[in-house]
Image: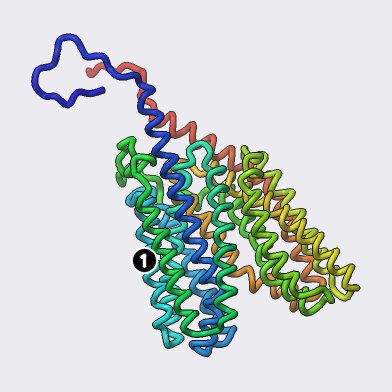
Amino acid sequence: MISTDTAVRPATPAPSRPAAAPVPVRANRREAAQRRVLASSMVGNAGYGLLSTITVLYYSGALQLSATRIGLTLTAAGLAAALLGVPAGRLADTRIPARVGAGVSYLLLAVMESLLVLVRSFTLLVVVLTVAAGFEMLARTMRQVTVAGLGGERAAEFRAKVAARANLAMLAGMGASSLVIACDSPAVYRAAIAAACVCTAGQGLLMLAVPADALPGPGGADGSPLPSAGTAPSRWLVLRDLPYLAICGLYAVMTMAECVITVALPLRISQHTQAPTWLVGVFGIANVLAVGLLLTRVGRLVGTPARAGRAMAVGGALNGLFVLLLMLAADRSPATSVALLAAGMLLAVTAQLCVLPAENELTMTLAPARARGQYLGLSETALTTALTLGPAVVTLATVDTGRTGWALLAAAFALAGAAAPAAARAAGRNTARATVEAALGAAPSKCPPRPEG
């Protein structure tokens, strides 16, 4: 320990405390910080589950907007926000502590969400939704950087834990939204939006409450300064990492399987089978519960990029089979349709439990520490783009093109999964090479200086 007494130093140094003493304190701080991030994610996702379910109905009722205009607005806002992923990550790498950026962004998002009850025109709705989507992207990217910092060597496992808890909380929000829809009152809709805003604000405050000394890097306890312009990674470093780009692209394709569950499955059950429509709700709840309860445990089994690549390959094949079973469920007896649909949903849930931890492992582990923000920002961009364009792509493939579209969609999932192991190996080699180069660049030279003259 360094003495802070500036008077007379004793001739014999005082005995210092054991070096291992601060470790439990730091570990306790990190555990407390992890609990706050978990609480933040659960509170925010409860509000998201409530808001995402009722807003479309609110827009169509209060503003008298058609489904087409609402869909185009949400798509435009999502694509605009997707462009902010890498710049947001760059800010977390070089300028703003991630926990602060996430907390402030969630607070600003809550403000934008509260304006929804005041919107009375389509133009203003477009502006509010676009700005809100931008703040959401900033918040999510910086939250992922915070999760990576708190997770340390087990960043992927901690991220899976956060996602699992968030899924369960979102289910609670969706359950509350069903009561709001049943009331079908403008006043109740506005009250629900206000409650969702409070949840989002609470999420931001909990992120700001994460102690800085529990995190490495900018603003962390290690005292490392923000990178200067000369030492900071290139603004577009991640865009030159082709294997990582490939992983994000493959994951974007796999993510569209979620849109099959939320868009194609309800349409298939209600319009092309004799199965009871209440299966839509049962399948949705089962999907969320399975992911929420099992994701963390399964994530521990996917502990290396090689395993993650193989898990994504299995997930792609299962998603392909899921799509084919949905296709075959049409125009059959009720019992046969229910059996095929149930088997398909079992495959879909299993596929998600393969793909989600695999994506966590690949995007977290293969992101270099000096540019982790922009790498995770790219993964958020891929996710947002897939979820934004997914409903349109899935609808086009499964509604407008018949069985050919279903077969092509199944093939896309299977091929994306099959390409994942090779992409994971290439990205792993890139990361290893970058780690060696960074170590060599940081190591001081052991050669004596050459004498002048």
Is 140 placed above or below 295 here? below
**Colour scheme employed for the rendering of this structure:** rainbow
**Position of 59 relative to 377 (above/below):** below
Which residue does the image show at 63% across and 49% down from the upper left? 295
Q: Quadrant of the N terminus?
A: top left
Which residue is under mark 1?
Answer: 108
Residue closer to the observer: 209 or 250: 209
In the image, 40: left or right of 205?
right
Label 1 Cα neighbours within 10 Å, binned few <14 / some 14-19 / many ≥20: many
Q: Residue furthest top?
A: 12
Instruction: Give residue 287's quadrant in the image.
Output: bottom right
Tell me residue 198's x, y (percent): 41, 67
Question: Disc 1 residue type?
Answer: Leu
Residue 308 in which image quadrant: top right
Secondary structure at badge 1 equals: helix
Q: What residue lies at 32% left-to-right and 38% top-to-bottom?
A: 224
Instruction: Indicate the position of residue 9 as horizontal and vertical percent values.
Output: 13, 16
Which residue occupies the foreground of this view, 235 or 94?
Answer: 94
- Residue 366 percent coordinates (x, y): 54, 42
136 in relation to 445, above or below: below
Q: State the image coordinates of residue 167 (x, y, percent, origin top left).
A: 58, 57
Outermost residue toward the bottom in this view: 64
Horizontal arrangement in the rendering, residue 367 relative to residue 451 (left or right):
right
Left or right: residue 112 compared with residue 265: left
Point out the residue furthest to the left here.
7
Q: How many marks?
A: 1
Q: Looking at the figure, which quarter contains the C terminus?
A: top left
